[in-house]
Image (cartoon, rainbow, N blue to C red):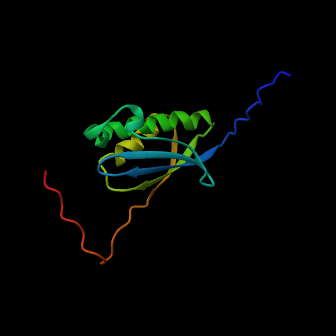
Amino acid sequence: MVKTAKKRIRKTFEHGKVCIRANYNNTIVTLTDAEGNVLGWSSPGANGYKGARQATPYAGQISAEKVAELALSFGMKDVDVYVKGMGPGRDQTIRGLMNGGLGITSIIERTRVPHGGCRSRRIRKV
């Protein structure tokens, strides 16, 4: 008996979401469909950057361009961008999505802001 490979049906999406998590040490870019189901992701570590080079804006831009390439393979043209965190790669990552050929419908800020609450850590002096 010969087993035949099951043909995989590739879904296409016209619109999606890109979530950017910008830490001080890393930038993670996630591609989801309109409902929030993850289709793919990229980070500087997955693209060969290790250590302090992960925290650079350029590494975030490279990750965003990989995600844009993946989004175009799913047939996406426009995305909503959700940004969370205060890392150095925030703005450059959004530019990387535009350079990759995606249209950006909206940019939504999701960074948490403490109102009173616990005393924050000291600021690191480099």
- The residue under the point 83% across, 21% down is 2
Residue lying farthest to the front in this orientation? 1
Identify whether 20 is placed above or below 45: below
Q: Is residue 77 left or right of residue 59?
A: right
- The residue under the point 45% across, 35% down is 65
Give the x, y percent position of residue 117: 31, 77
Residue lying farthest to the right in this orientation? 1
Q: Is residue 63 left or right of residue 75?
A: left
Which quadrant would the N terminus be assigned to in this image? top right
Residue 55, by quadrant, is top left
- The residue under the point 70% across, 35% down is 10
Residue lying farthest to the bottom in this orientation? 116
Q: Nearer the viewer, residue 118 or 36?
A: 118
Identify whether 101 is placed above or below 110: above
Give the x, y percent position of residue 103: 52, 42
Give the x, y percent position of residue 99: 44, 34
Q: Nearer the viewer, residue 2 or 52?
A: 2
Give the x, y percent position of residue 46: 42, 36
Q: Is residue 81 left or right of residue 48?
A: right
Residue lying farthest to the left in this orientation? 125
- The residue under the point 65% across, 43% down is 13
How many discs appear?
Answer: 0
